Image (cartoon, rainbow, N blue to C red):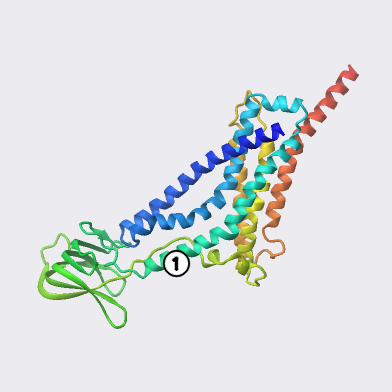
Amino acid sequence: MIVFRYMSREVLVTLSAVSAVLLVIIMSGRFIKYLAQAAQGVLDPGVLFMIMGVRLPGFLQLILPLGLFLGILLAYGRLYLDSEMTVLSATGVSPQRMLVYTLAPAALVALLVAWLSLSLAPQGVAQQMRILNEQDALTEFDTLVPGRFQSMKDGSRVTYTQQLSKERDELAGVFISEKRFSRQGGKERGITVLVAESGRQEIQADGSRYLILQNGYRYDGNPGQADYRAIQYDTYGVLLPKPTVSDEISEREAVPTRELIGSDNLRFQSELQWRLSLPLLVFVVTLLAVPLSRVNPRQGRFLKLLPAILLYMAYLSLLIAARGALDKGKIPPQLGLWWVHGLFALIGLGLLYWEPLRLKWAGRRAAQEVARG
């Protein structure tokens, strides 16, 4: 029991540290993407942390299996390096018993991943889609920030306002620069610059929104040329385009798990098998990590880390490829993703029993040579 608690603590502590680092890296990359969309004016900066919060379960369901895999490799690698595993082996702790000890913390991680993949992650995706749909309903006027030049996603339009009322319905000191394109071929024909003392938003009966500018000038021409046309106006209307928020999510990821069960839709069956595969992934990577963590103290604890990571990447890549094939009907649902787990489980069993069998055969050969001598 003492050995079990010691090994479980080592695995869980290392798992927590590795998962925390991976989570920070992944969330930082995704946050930078959303921050760039907010800087372009297609996303309200106030919803950035809300989006990251609802996406957290989706990140964790993929990070925890990898964190457990690396945690076992690093924790047990240290025990081998410090010869603690040699002492445990001398007291009767076989690789099979080590696997049994490791399956206990792996079961806790699998339960957490199952909760995330079957319940929390779909809810988070549904909330994210709702937030993004609300952002899609915004216009350029709604995302303006006073004192900052705001560019649309395609770079064809730049808007600036010096002041903006708290109700976001009145502007002062307006500047708009927009590229003009030909109707045939979409070739750029020049730019149009609008400046105005003030502006307000006006909603038409069909739902379209216009920015009504007051007391300003319109300049049409080509940069570098002196043939600009200047027009003074008292009132000028500008159509406000809707920013488009993009993200790599699909509607089926937001479907509750209970609606996926028993569905005849092939994509729903694929999604259900994917969600069930993540907890199963935890046990399979545990079976792979325990024998891969065995290192020679002279070689260092990181010798097998790179091959182990490559094996994990092959496992996950094959699982994703099988999911895509299942979506397209190239794999029968009965076979689904289960054959991938079965294949790597067999690889894990082979790695687990290969070293003891090799040592046993080497001992037999040595005994035969001694007998012959």
Task: Classify mark 1: helix, strand or loop.
Answer: helix
Q: Nearer the viewer, residue 314 or 252?
A: 252
Above/below status of 56 relative to 241: above
At 87% from the left and 18% from the top, the residue drawn is: 370
Left/right of residue 127 with respect to residue 358 in the rendered view: left
**Residue 99 percent coordinates (x, y):** 72, 39
Q: Is residue 342 visible?
A: yes
Q: Nearer the viewer, residue 23 or 369?
A: 23
Above/below status of 166 relative to 112: below
Dot 1 crowding, Cα within 10 Å, few <14, some 14–19, many 20+: few
At 75% from the left and 33% from the top, the residue drawn is: 355
What's the amino acid at mark 1? Arg
Residue wearing tag 1: 130
At 67% from the left and 58% from the top, the residue drawn is: 337
Left/right of residue 225 with respect to residue 88 in the rendered view: left
Above/below status of 180 relative to 295: below
**Residue 96 percent coordinates (x, y):** 76, 37
Q: Residue furthest front?
A: 1
Q: Nearer the viewer, residue 65 or 186?
A: 65
- The image quadrant where one finds the C terminus is top right
Left/right of residue 176 with respect to residue 41 in the rendered view: left
**Residue 45 percent coordinates (x, y):** 33, 57
Q: Is residue 293 visible?
A: no
Residue 79: quarter of image? top right
Q: Residue furthest right?
A: 371
Q: Nearer the viewer, residue 371 or 349?
A: 349
Residue 136: quarter of image? bottom left
- The image quadrant where one finds the N terminus is top right
**Residue 257 percent coordinates (x, y):** 61, 65
Q: Residue furthest top?
A: 373
